[in-house]
Image (cartoon, grey):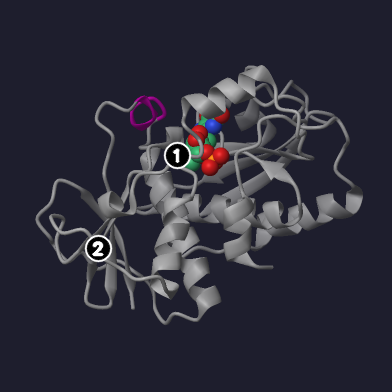
Amino acid sequence: MNYIETMKTRRSVRTYLREPISKSDLDKITKITKDITNPFDAGTRLCLVDNETADERLGTYGMMRGAKTFIVGCVAPGDMNIEGFGYVFEKAILNLTAMGLGTCWLGGTFKRGVFARAAKLTDGEIIAAVMPVGHINEKRTVLERIVANGAGARKRIDFSELFFDGNFETSLELPEGDLRTCLQMVRIGPSASNKQPWRIVKVGDNLHFYLAKTPGYAGNIAYGFEMQRIDMGIAACQFEHAARELGLKGGIVLSDPKIPTKFEYSFTWQG
Ligand SMILES: Cc1cc2nc3c(=O)[nH]c(=O)nc-3n(C[C@H](O)[C@H](O)[C@H](O)COP(=O)(O)O)c2cc1C
C-alpha cells in the first residue's frame, strides 16, 4: 500500500452504511489488529467487537451513526505506552483506509464500561481509544457536519508554527522535498479535538518531537492518562511511514537534547 497517498485521503468518518463488512474483509481486519508492532515497546491489544454478537450495546452516544463494528484499543502499563498505542492505532487506521473502509478515532464519546467488558480488559490494561470501522456513508448527518466543523476538521496550524530550526524561536525554512513531505504528513494527521499538539525542532539531521500540551484540556484529565500523548504516537507513525516510503534513512530513538522549552520532550527521529 502507499502510505502517503492514504494519509492524504484519510478523514474521520462519523456516518456509516448499514451494509456489513464482508467475511474476507473481516479476516483482513483481524490480521491488521494482530500484526502491528511499535517503536516504543508498548504492549497493545486491538480487539475487534461487533454489535451483532456483543452482550451489551456498544454505544457511542449517537456520535458514530450506523457503526456496528469497532476496534477496541487496549494498552498495558509502560513508560511510552500511550505513544506506542497511538502509533499502532494510527497504522491500523491507515491500513483500513487503504482497504476503502471508514474509521474515526474515539477518545471520549463511547461507553467505556461496555467496551471494557466486550474487550475483556485484563488487570492493568486500559482502553486508550476505540474506533468504528465500516463502509462510508457519503451522506453525512447534520450532527457529523457540526462535529467536524466544530473541531475545524480540515484546518491545520501553519507549518511555521509547528516546525523549528535549532531552537523554538526560529521557524524551519524547508524547500519542497522529501523531508518537507514527511513533516506535512505529521501536520495532516488526526489529533484529539484537532489540537495538533506536536512541535518539532530540527537539529542537524535529527528531528526532536515535543508535546505542546493544551492547558486545561479535559482529555488530559478525565481518563487517567494524557490523551494528547496519543497524538505524539500518531505523529511518529505518520512521519516514519512517510520517511520509509521516500527512502529517508533514520529511526525513532529516545534521546532528549535538553533544549530549553515549555514543551515536553517525546522522542527523536535520528536521521
Ligand atoms: C486521540 C484522539 C481522540 C479523538 N476522539 C474523538 C471523539 O471522541 N469523537 C470524535 O468525533 N472525534 C474524535 N477524534 C477525531 C478528531 O476530532 C479529528 O481527528 C480531528 O478533528 C481532525 O479531523 P480529521 O481526522 O477528519 O482529519 C479524536 C482524534 C484523536 C487523535
Helix, strand or loop at disc 1?
Answer: loop
Mark 2 residue crowding within 10 angstroms, few (<14) / some (14–19) / many (20+): many
Q: Which residue is drawn at 12% across and 55% down?
A: 169
Tell me the amino acid under the disc marked 2.
Leu
- Number of disc labels: 2
Residue of label 1? 155
* Quadrant that contains the N terminus: bottom right
Residue of label 2? 172
Is there any visible trace of residue 128 in the rendered image?
Answer: no
Q: Is residue 162 above or below residue 103?
A: below
Which residues lie in the magenta part? 218-223
Question: Position of 137 compared to 224: left or right?
Answer: right
Which x, y percent locates residue 250? 39, 79
Res 142 → quadrant = top right
* Quadrant that contains the C terminus: bottom left
Q: Is residue 113 above or below residue 177?
A: above
